[in-house]
Amino acid sequence: MTKILVVSGHTDLQRNSFANKIILSRLEEIMPEAEYVYLDTEYPGWKFDVEREQDRLRSADVIVMQFPFFWYGVPSLMHKWMEEVFVHGFSHGSKGKALVGKKLVISFTSGAPEEMYQAGGLQGYPVEDFLIPLKQFAKACGMIWAGYVYSGGLSYASRHDDAKLQAMKEKALAHADKAAGLVKSL
């Protein structure tokens, strides 16, 4: 059986998330066999148990990174986790072979609508262009880039509008279903 590790990199999931909270809850319903790591609640002081995190990664076949797209990349908490856990000799380098062959899935949301992430759009580039560092991260670690699931237009700022909230909830649930489908297809 495939071992799935889902890592939530939201910096404050319970108080400052709408979509990511729904996505993760739905993923837990669809894939209860997966292991879920909520970095913000497990490490509120951002002091990681590196050995524990590396053990989780070693035992996984598929690693899913779930996060909101902050300033064109992963949130600061997830970035710090990556810096401290994915170290030379573990994940990369001549002796860093612990993650070779593991599949990496990126699942992320943005407040800006999808149409803003295209050539000529407000963001200036397609969303895929912003994923190059994560693709290179997977390559450097010997992981297999297994794809991504992206949904835009999921702005926490819309939380006071009931119609927008309902539409975002439906979009977040669809996102989770798509992400689970991708993971289960691997």
Image (spheres, rainbow, N blue to C red):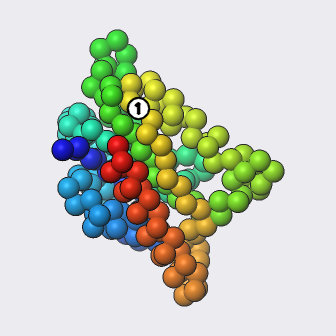
Residue count near mark 1 (Cα–Cα under 10 Å), binned few <14, some 14–19, many ≥20: some
Q: Residue at x 34, y 67 (%)?
A: 26
Which corner quadrant holds the C terminus? top left
Q: Quadrant of the N terminus?
A: top left
Q: Residue at x 57, y 86 (%)?
A: 163
Q: Hey, which residue is sitting farthest right in the picture?
A: 120
Number of marks in picture: 1
Q: Which structural element holds mark 1?
A: strand
Residue drawn where x is 59% and y is 77% of the image: 158
Percent coordinates x, y for residue 8 in the rendering: 37, 54
Quadrant of residue 97 within the rendered picture: top left
Asked whether residue 76 appears in the rendered view, the answer is no
Q: Is residue 150 left or right of residue 87?
A: right
Of 143 and 9, which appears nearest the observer? 143
Regarding residue 158, the answer to whether it shows in the image is yes
Point out the residue furthest to the bottom here: 162
Task: Reply above or below: 112 against 55.
Answer: below
Task: Name the residue that disc number 1 marks.
Answer: 144
Where in the figure is residue 33, as x and y percent of width and height? 20, 55
**Residue 72 image offset from top left, x and y in percent:** 60, 48
Badge 1 amino acid: Ile
Rendered residue at 55%/46% (across/down): 73
Above or below, 112 against 131 in this view is below
